[in-house]
Image (cartoon, helix red, strand yellow):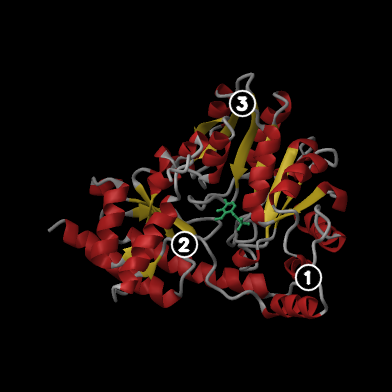
Amino acid sequence: MAIHIASRMDKMAPSGIRKVNEKALAMERAGRHVIHFEIGRPDFDTPEYIKKAAKERLDAGDVFYTSNFGTMELRQAIADKLRRENNIDCKPTEILVTAGLSEAVFAVLASLLDAGDEILVPDPVWMNYINVPRLLGAVPVTYELKEENEYQMDLAEIESKITDRTRAIVIVTPNNPTGGVLSERTLNGLAEIAIRHDLAVISDEVYERLIYVGEKHISIASLPGMKERTFTMNGMSKAYSMTGWRIGYVAASEEFIPVLNKFHQHNTTCAVSFAQAASAVALNEEGDEVKEMVKEYTRRRDYAVKAINEIPGLSCLKPKGAFYIFINCKKLGMKSADLAAYLLENAEIALVPGDVFGPGGEGYLRMSFANSYENIVEGCRRLREAVENLKK
Ligand SMILES: Cc1ncc(COP(=O)(O)O)c(C=O)c1O
């Protein structure tokens, strides 16, 4: 039987990251030793105090549907965290708990965008912000994040791209794939534009805790006049190394939460009960666990950035946040996809071609340093050797 595929599915490209990953895994099955720099997930185990809390709650029978909005216990813990760490004065009723931030992105975009509406999104960017609007029949209008601007957005460009169909502006800070962090100056300028044009801001802060010494994460919702128009998007995945637990959340105006919940109810009903319970413990009882992980990410980042900048033909900025290095390979004169394929096949290192994140990523490779220090040292050695061989 030829099963009909809805035409809207053509609007979503399959993940370019998974494509690299599948190839790397196939090589491994054939007995080759690939170093994985393509995956955007922390390589640490979830901290013990969080796992313990989940086990206890599971044993206590916390195995049923929760409120669609999320448990009051977790919503309260999130509200406390947002007040304490992000300077956002938030009530539990202004929070919706979702099955990972990915679900929150879908719920927010589906609730905001009609067909034909426009949404401003960064280029390059994590592709859900392109694919989900397209699936909804809306139009993602890109704005550039350039290396020469240290990946800050150009506010004049933003303003020039606003039309009467624009509904929202997406920011991702710290950023995947660039590792950039939006400065206070940029955020103040953006807030002024959003207020003047009466636009919503979708602020993806999932890498917020992975920020390096000397940098500061600012939540745009904490700026004057911004809370009512901002969707602050975050989750447990990256900070606490909990990607498989699928807990995310969105903080928005109290009136909007039931709108988002309509989507969420029909999508997943609720997030996993005992994962919600453990997430509340993660937020309320954190010790040095995240700090320790950031310390180790810093050690890896510093090594890799130095090593890459010593390879003739490659260069990179030092990422300010997240765990990605965006390697400029323009001087090698090859397309990113061809270079990534060459490196995987010949050096057995898996990197993501930058164009996977949008046209602005062409000429770059994304390297995730969520891998062991030893693998990073060996991976950089292989990278150097393979690039040198290109010139022979
Ligand atoms: C910018 C960004 N937002 C959201 C997510 C998804 O997070 P979650 O695991 O909570 O769905 C990712 C995952 O890579 C990401 O890079």
CA neighbours of label 3 inside 10 A, class few (<14), some (14 to 19), many (20+): many
**Mark 3 highlights which residue?**
117
Looking at the image, can residue 366 be seen? no
Q: CA distance from mark 3 to mark 1?
A: 40 Å
Looking at the image, can residue 364 be seen? yes
**Mark 1 highlights which residue?**
63
Q: Is residue 115 above or below residue 204?
A: above
Q: Quadrant of residue 362?
A: top left
**At x 80% / y 68%, what residue is drawn?**
284
**Mark 2 highlights which residue?**
39
Task: Tell me if label 3 and label 2 are in contact, CB under 8 Å.
Answer: no
Extreme residue in the top direction:
164
Which numbered tag is attached to residue 175?
none
Q: Which three-letter amino acid code belongs to the residue tagged 1?
A: Val
Q: Is residue 173 above or below residue 322?
A: above
Q: Is residue 98 left or right of residue 11?
A: right
Q: Is residue 174 left or right of residue 91?
A: left
If you read the primary sequence from the N terminus, does the residue marked by circle 3 or circle 1 appear first? 1
Under tag 3, what secondary structure? loop
Q: Quadrant of residue 389?
A: bottom left
Q: Is residue 328 left or right of residue 55?
A: left
Mark 1 or mark 2, which is nearer to you? 1
Mark 3 or mark 1, which is nearer to you? 1
Q: Which three-letter amino acid code belongs to the residue tagged 2?
A: Ile
Percent across and percent down for residue 337 are 31, 49
Under tag 1, what secondary structure? loop
Under tag 2, what secondary structure? loop
Q: Is residue 113 above or below residue 257?
A: above
